[in-house]
Amino acid sequence: MNDSNIALLIDYENVGIDSLQSLVERLSGMGRIIVKRAYADWSTQRKGQERLIELGVEAIHNYRTSRSGKNSCDIKLTIDAVELLHSTQIDTFALVSSDSDFVPLVNHLRGSGKYVVGAGRKAVTATTMVKSCDQYIFLDTDTHQTKTPYASPKRNGNTKNSKRENTVSQNSASDSDVAGTLLVRAVEASMDDDGNALGTKLAQTMMRIDPSFNYKTMGYRSFRDFLTSRNEVDVTFREGTDFTVSVKSTETDNKGRKNIHPNPSVPKVSPKIIEARSESDTSKQSENGSDIDWAIEINAAWSKRNSDNISVQAAASIAARILGFKRLRDSSYSTLDKLISSSETLEANWSRNKNSVVRNS
């Protein structure tokens, strides 16, 4: 298996030398870095040149006159990137800059079929730059430090340290919330009719939604460790390396907050044994002006969400709970398509559209 050929182009005046060592190591795990260049006016940027030499980075000098703006190095970097695109066998471009002015270059490289990795400081990187790349690495995040995910800060007598640890804890909690939301979005975007997403592809889906996602920065050694630590999902392991992920059912309390149930509660009533009905049976029910009780309950429950678009997983979870089953597939109506088509009420008001159940207009 051939390694990917990588071109590392650094806007040095934008990011400096910090964290470049760890970046080079991380890129080396992705393939062969055959081009390493750092762009700056080296007559004024004297610090860090020895470290660049140690990393094997070529310093590209660009004189800056009083009339030339700060973008002169950016233009030189862009020209070199386009030349490399057409003259060498580069598979991956790593652009080290927090500057959103490089978004057109990123779009051009990706449009030419190249994989683009961006890197920069989290505090100053524009969201447009992050979203434009296939992957984005924040240089001010230490991915090599082993830590317990979202650990509470230790108490001590040092007020400054305590404040700093509280800030770290708050940032970690915030990152945890963002990661949880991203995880649910990725599962809902890639799940099948049963509400399950293939775990081996889920990390890729999360990175496509948010290129800055990296479970290692949160202290996890593997993606599996990250998944099993999350309260938002259930992970089902199978033979070999295959496993599936599904979103846990949620309920909303009287304050509008979502309560996630790690283990679905056992129904208070016995499961309703529902047999599939023929079309003639359904027609008779319609002629009498009535429909099956459970269908009316499901229609009412879906309507209470005050949304014309319900995710497949949420719709199936609600239906399963009303039917008295843990999962919809355990009932006679194993899919939402079968469920909707079995009832005049549901078929008149709802229809399936890819990964959603939508209200008929």
Image: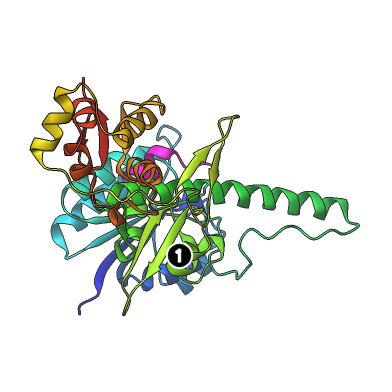
Horizontally, is 47 left or right of 208 in the view? Answer: right
Residue 1 visible in the shown view: yes
* Residue under the point 13% across and 30% down: 284
**x, y percentage for residue 86?**
14, 56
* Residue under the point 15% across and 50% down: 112
Tag 1's secondary structure?
helix
Q: Is residue 129 magenta?
A: yes
Horizontally, is 172 left or right of 116 in the view? Answer: right
- Residue at the far left in the pictured view: 280
Magenta stretch secondary structure, dominant: helix
**Which color scheme is applied?**
rainbow
**x, y percentage for residue 148?**
63, 66
Q: Which residue is mark 1?
A: 23
Task: Say if 284 sits above or below 21 in the image.
Answer: above
Q: Residue 322 occupies which quadrant of the picture? A: top left
Residue 14 visible in the shown view: no
- Residue at the far right in the pictured view: 157
